[in-house]
C-alpha cells in the first residue's frame, strides 16, 4: 500500500519557476568550473614556459662557461645536452677527450715552433722543455718509455743511481 499523504502536490507555475532557477544555477556552476579549469590550464602553461626559460638560461650559462678557444660550437652544444640530461659520466668523458686532444695539439704546435725558433729551443731536435728529476719520478710507465725513446740520454741520467 502506498502512502500518498507524504507526497506534496506542486502547481505547474511553481514547478516551472524552480526548474528554471535550477537550470540557471547548473549553468552558473558549469561556467564557474570552466573558468577555474581555464585558470588552471593557464597557470600550467605559464609554469611550463617558466620552466623552459629557466632550463634555457641554465643551458646558456653552461655553454658560456666553456672556453671557445678549446671547444667548438658543436662540442659546447653536445656538452650542454649531456649537462641538461644529467649525464655526468658522458659529459666528463667527452670533455676529457677534448681537453686531452687540445693539449696534445698545443704541445705539438709548441714543439714545431721550438724546432724552428732557436730562442725557444737551444738544442735542436730535443724537447724544448727540459724534464726535472721530480717530474721524471712522477711519470707513469708510458711516459717514461716515451722519454726513453725520444731522449735516451736523459732517461739514462734519471735511471742511473
Image (tube, grey):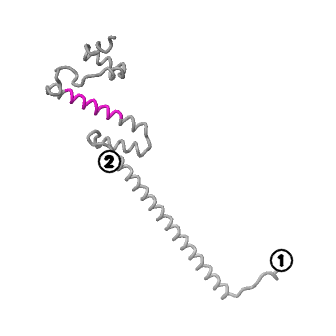
Residue 135 placement, left or right of 121: right
How many residues crowd mark 2 within 10 Å: few (<14), some (14–19), many (20+)? few
Residue drawn at (83%, 79%), measured in percent from left and top? 3
Could you give the CA–CA distance between mark 2 and mark 1, rounded to whole angstroms? 85 Å
Q: Of helix, strand and loop, which one carries label 1?
A: loop
> In the image, which disc is placed on residue 14?
none
The circle on residue 64 is: 2
| Residue 150 in the image: above or below residue 21 | above
Residue 80 vs 111, above or below: the answer is below
Q: Quadrant of the C terminus?
A: top left
Q: Name the residue under label 1.
A: 2
Up/down of 90 relative to 122, above or below: below
Q: Position of residue 42 (x, y in %)?
A: 46, 65
Residue 57 lies, with reference to residue 148, above or below; the image says: below
Residue 6: x and y in percent read: 80, 81
Q: State the image coordinates of residue 35 (x, y, percent, origin top left).
A: 51, 71
> Which residue shows up at 43% across the image and 39% down it?
88
The part of the image, by quadrant, that contains residue 111 is top left
Amino acid at each position: 500500500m502506498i502512502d500518498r499523504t507524504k507526497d506534496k502536490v506542486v502547481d505547474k507555475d511553481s514547478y516551472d519557476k524552480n526548474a528554471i532557477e535550477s537550470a540557471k544555477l547548473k549553468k552558473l556552476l558549469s561556467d564557474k568550473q570552466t573558468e577555474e579549469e581555464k585558470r588552471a590550464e593557464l597557470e600550467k602553461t605559464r609554469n611550463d614556459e617558466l620552466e623552459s626559460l629557466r632550463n634555457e638560461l641554465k643551458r646558456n650559462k653552461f655553454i658560456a662557461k666553456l672556453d671557445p678557444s678549446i671547444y667548438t660550437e658543436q662540442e659546447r652544444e653536445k656538452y650542454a645536452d649531456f649537462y641538461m640530461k644529467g649525464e655526468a659520466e658522458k659529459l666528463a668523458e667527452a670533455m676529457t677527450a677534448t681537453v686531452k686532444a687540445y693539449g696534445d695539439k698545443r704541445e705539438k704546435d709548441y714543439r714545431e715552433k721550438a724546432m724552428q725558433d732557436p730562442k725557444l729551443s737551444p738544442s735542436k731536435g730535443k724537447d724544448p722543455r727540459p724534464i726535472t728529476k721530480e717530474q721524471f719520478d712522477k711519470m707513469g710507465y708510458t711516459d717514461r718509455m716515451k722519454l726513453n725513446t725520444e731522449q735516451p740520454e736523459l732517461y739514462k741520467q734519471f735511471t742511473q743511481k
